[in-house]
């Protein structure tokens, strides 16, 4: 069995701004247009999974304390599940499908058993868990403004966002920060860039 690991990052959808009150009532932290964009991204995530071999497990997990990250993951999972109903070869498990009262070890065993008993299927598991490394602290305040730390690093680098990000995340051989047409991107081991 090939246990090749692939790493892809999808960024959260569009958050409401202070002047924008069109937050989605169903998905807190993102606007209605952001829900539409996240549903389109869910389609491309599912298309990506369709290209993989049977037995592939794609895990969509990882969120920061920002509610929009969890809401975006929920949109991805719910829309992917809806779309996958038309496709017999893909099974989608969302947070809604999992009874967390069972305990995580039992949940992990149930998911493992499901994968083992369906070797001809592809799996998308969407559970937006908090990942400390995705935390916005110490970069932003709860209000979404730059924290004093971020302001100090930006000042130190004369407003250069690339150099500031390199210092804040600790650029390594695996992680690179770049800028294209004024937009800052994070590159991880040759995977698709993520706009910061």
Image (tube, rainbow, N blue to C red):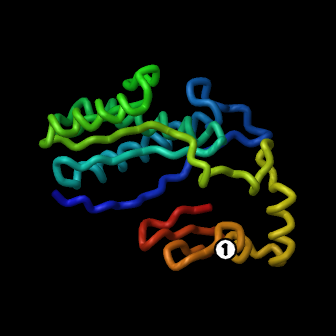
In this view, 163 is above or below 69 = below
Viewer-closest of 164 and 83: 164
**Residue drawn at 25 percent across, 59 percent down:** 3
Residue 133 image position (x, y, % from top left): 60, 54
Residue 42 lies left or right of residue 29; in this view the side is left
**Residue drawn at 48 percent across, 42 percent down:** 38
Residue 23 image position (x, y, % from top left): 66, 32
Q: Which residue in the protein does label 1 denote?
A: 166
Viewer-closest of 148 and 159: 148
**Location of residue 71 (image quadrant):** top right
Residue 147 lies left or right of residue 96; in this view the side is right
Please say whether residue 78 is visible from this viewpoint.
no
**Residue drawn at 22 percent across, 33 percent down:** 114
Tag 1 secondary structure: helix
Q: How crowded is mark 1: few (under 14 residues within 10 Å), some or many (20 or more)?
A: some
Viewer-closest of 192 and 111: 111
Quarter of the image with the N terminus in it: bottom left
Quarter of the image with the C terminus in it: bottom right
**Location of residue 29 (image quadrant):** top right
In this view, 178 is above or below 28 = below
Residue 140 image position (x, y, % from top left): 77, 52
**Residue drawn at 58 percent across, 62 percent down:** 195
**Location of residue 19 (image quadrant):** top right
């Amino acid at each position: 069995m090939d246990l090749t690991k692939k790493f892809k990052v999808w960024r959260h959808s569009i958050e409401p701004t202070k002047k924008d009150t069109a937050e989605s009532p169903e998905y807190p932290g993102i606007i209605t247009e952001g829900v539409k964009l996240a549903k389109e991204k869910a389609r491309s995530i599912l298309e990506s999974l369709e290209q993989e071999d049977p037995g592939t497990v794609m895990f969509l997990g990882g969120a920061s304390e920002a509610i929009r990250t969890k809401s975006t993951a929920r949109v991805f999972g719910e829309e992917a599940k809806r779309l996958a109903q038309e496709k017999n070869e893909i099974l989608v498990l969302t947070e809604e499908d999992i009874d967390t009262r069972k305990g995580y070890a039992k949940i992990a065993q149930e998911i493992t058993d499901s994968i083992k008993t369906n070797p001809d299927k592809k799996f998308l598991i969407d559970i937006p868990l908090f990942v400390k490394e995705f935390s916005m602290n110490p970069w932003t305040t709860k209000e979404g403004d730059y924290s004093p730390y971020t302001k100090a690093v930006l000042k130190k680098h004369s407003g250069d966002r690339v150099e500031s990000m390199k210092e804040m995340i600790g650029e390594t051989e695996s992680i690179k920060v770049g800028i294209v047409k004024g937009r800052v991107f994070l590159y991880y081991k040759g995977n698709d860039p993520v706009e910061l």
